Image (cartoon, rainbow, N blue to C red):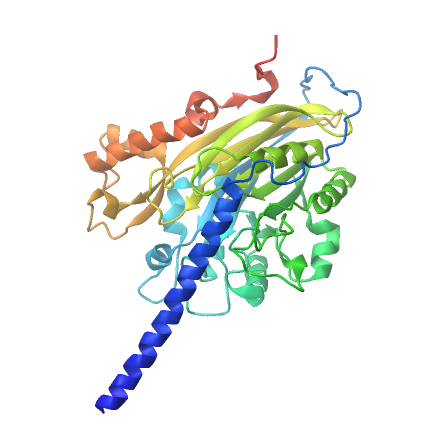
């Protein structure tokens, strides 16, 4: 029996060694890719941005009286760590994620169309995991739909965490829950249909959505390249060879749809950096030149700046473009400084029904804070993780309602978080400060 026991122990230790080796491998691989991204300065040829024709600046926007206005809400990345799966698990074995983010869903529920990015998968399995290879129960998708989301961006570095079968089932689950999706595909035919673009009519305003990711954490898609919209040819190694031709083709297809607006979602940047790197800026220039009106970024786990730009596309059309380089995490178990900070952005789009002119009317954001009660020495609440509307929580405490759990320590963390967020996201865009009226926005070079 002792020999059997020793043999079993030897096998167990061998299995643990293999698992630990693989986790170390994943960490090293992702770190190497992050370093390649961070070191990118002049490593690749600049994208070919055609010389624009003489500007077709229409001059100041003439606001008509017969308009269609829509609101699009944009959230960050669902980074579904094991702690969130544990938080969502109920006593009967089912899962309900809605309470984790219900306090933050005001913008989504008030909008006509709401977007979130998925950094997990829904494999056909009852075994779920967090980092480094995310998998979650399908009830997360149900919670997203019930909470007010409409479009799920599935192109991320974690798209392949459950391999091709998990990628396919993830899309099946989203379909079953009535959620639109963009960025990953089950077949070449699905990718070829409209160049993988999702075109939506949102209350009379048509929008084309495109989505791309820098890579797949080294998980190959050899032989089924259609499955993930990866914008690097060398997505398994150096991340320096950008597929500009592919994106040019896709953007041309988007323009040919003659939608009122083109929105591109980008999974890019250097993790934990609060400012965009050279590649993000270069790709943003390229996308605006190719006709994008709005660029929405993620992946970095921390927020990065947003800005309005006066842009001229390759056809000479001058307009105001909007970009947020990253909204960071929507929900996660990360609690380093800035990783628990995010925002929900509301884009108000106006279409003049007499002329057909469509433009960004206003932009605002609502600050959010991911609470981990254990970080603040709080227990006994019956929960651990919640995403809070930051100003709402602060205001509630100051009015004498502590949300049932807010201590002075947590209150101080909330106020410090708001201050931190404003160092990254321009406070002018904060909803509490009125947001930005894009039509009357004064650029620095304006007279």
Q: Which residue is located at x 45 percent, y 50 percent?
A: 31
Q: Residue furthest top?
A: 447
Whether residue 148 can be seen here: no
Q: Quadrant of residue 403?
A: top left
Using residue 12 as the reference point, say whether residue 155 is left or right of it. right
Q: Position of residue 53 (x, y in %)?
A: 80, 24
Quadrant where the C terminus lies? Answer: top right
Q: Position of residue 387 (x, y in %)?
A: 37, 43
Q: Quadrant of residue 174?
A: bottom right
Q: Which residue is located at x 35 percent, y 34 percent?
A: 390
Image mark count: 0
Q: Which residue is located at x 72 percent, y 47 percent?
A: 246
Residue 270 vertical position relative to residue 173 in the rendered view, above or below: above
Whether residue 61 can be seen here: yes
Which of the pair 293/365 is nearer the observer? 293
Residue 42 vertical position relative to residue 238 in the rendered view, above or below: above
Quadrant where the N terminus lies? Answer: bottom left
Using residue 427 as the reference point, say whether residue 409 is left or right of it. left
Q: Position of residue 425 (x, y in %)?
A: 45, 29
Q: Residue furthest front?
A: 43
Q: Which residue is located at x 59 percent, y 63 percent?
A: 168
Q: Position of residue 106 (x, y in %)?
A: 44, 38
Using residue 29 as the reference point, say whether residue 252 is left or right of it. right
Residue 120 vertical position relative to residue 363 in the rendered view, above or below: below
Q: Quadrant of residue 330?
A: top left
Which of the pair 88/106 is nearer the observer? 88
């Amino acid at each position: 029996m002792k020999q059997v026991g020793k043999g079993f122990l030897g096998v167990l230790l061998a299995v643990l060694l293999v698992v630990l080796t693989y986790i170390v491998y994943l960490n090293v691989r992702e770190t190497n890719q992050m370093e390649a991204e961070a070191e990118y300065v002049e490593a690749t040829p600049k994208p070919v941005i055609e010389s624009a024709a003489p500007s077709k600046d229409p001059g100041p926007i003439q606001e008509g009286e017969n308009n269609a206005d829509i609101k699009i809400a944009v959230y960050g990345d669902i980074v579904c760590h094991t702690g969130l799966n544990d938080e969502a698990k109920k006593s009967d074995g089912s899962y309900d994620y809605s309470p984790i983010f219900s306090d933050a869903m005001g913008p989504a529920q008030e909008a006509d169309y709401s977007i979130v990015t998925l950094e997990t998968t829904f494999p056909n399995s009852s075994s779920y995991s967090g980092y480094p290879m995310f998998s979650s129960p399908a009830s997360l998708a149900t919670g997203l739909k019930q909470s007010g989301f409409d479009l799920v961006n599935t192109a991320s570095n974690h798209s392949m965490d459950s391999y091709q079968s998990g990628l396919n089932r993830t899309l099946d689950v989203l379909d079953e829950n009535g959620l639109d999706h963009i960025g990953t595909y089950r077949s070449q035919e699905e990718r070829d249909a409209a160049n993988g673009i999702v075109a939506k009519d949102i209350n009379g305003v048509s929008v084309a959505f495109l989505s791309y990711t820098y890579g797949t954490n080294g998980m190959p898609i050899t032989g089924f390249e259609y499955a993930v919209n990866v914008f690097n040819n060398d997505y398994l190694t150096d991340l320096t060879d950008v597929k500009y031709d592919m994106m040019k083709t896709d953007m041309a297809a988007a323009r040919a749809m003659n939608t009122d607006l083109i929105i591109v979602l980008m999974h890019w940047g250097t993790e934990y950096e609060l400012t965009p790197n050279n590649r993000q800026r270069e790709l943003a220039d390229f996308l605006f030149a190719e006709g994008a009106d709005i660029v929405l970024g993620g992946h970095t786990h921390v927020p990065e700046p947003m800005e309005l730009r006066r842009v001229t596309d390759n056809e000479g059309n001058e307009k105001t473009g909007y970009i947020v380089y990253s909204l960071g995490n929507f929900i996660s178990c990360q609690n380093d400084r800035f990783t628990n900070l995010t925002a929900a952005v509301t884009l108000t789009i106006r279409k003049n029904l007499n002329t057909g002119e469509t433009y960004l009317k206003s932009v605002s954001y609502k600050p959010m804070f991911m609470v981990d009660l254990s970080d603040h020495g709080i227990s006994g609440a019956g929960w651990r993780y919640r995403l809070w509307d930051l100003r709402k929580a602060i205001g509630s405490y100051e009015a004498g309602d502590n949300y049932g759990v807010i201590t002075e320590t947590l209150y101080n963390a909330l106020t410090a978080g708001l201050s931190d967020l404003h160092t990254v996201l321009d406070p002018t865009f904060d909803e509490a400060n009125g947001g930005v009226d894009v039509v009357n926005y004064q650029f620095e070079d304006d007279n």
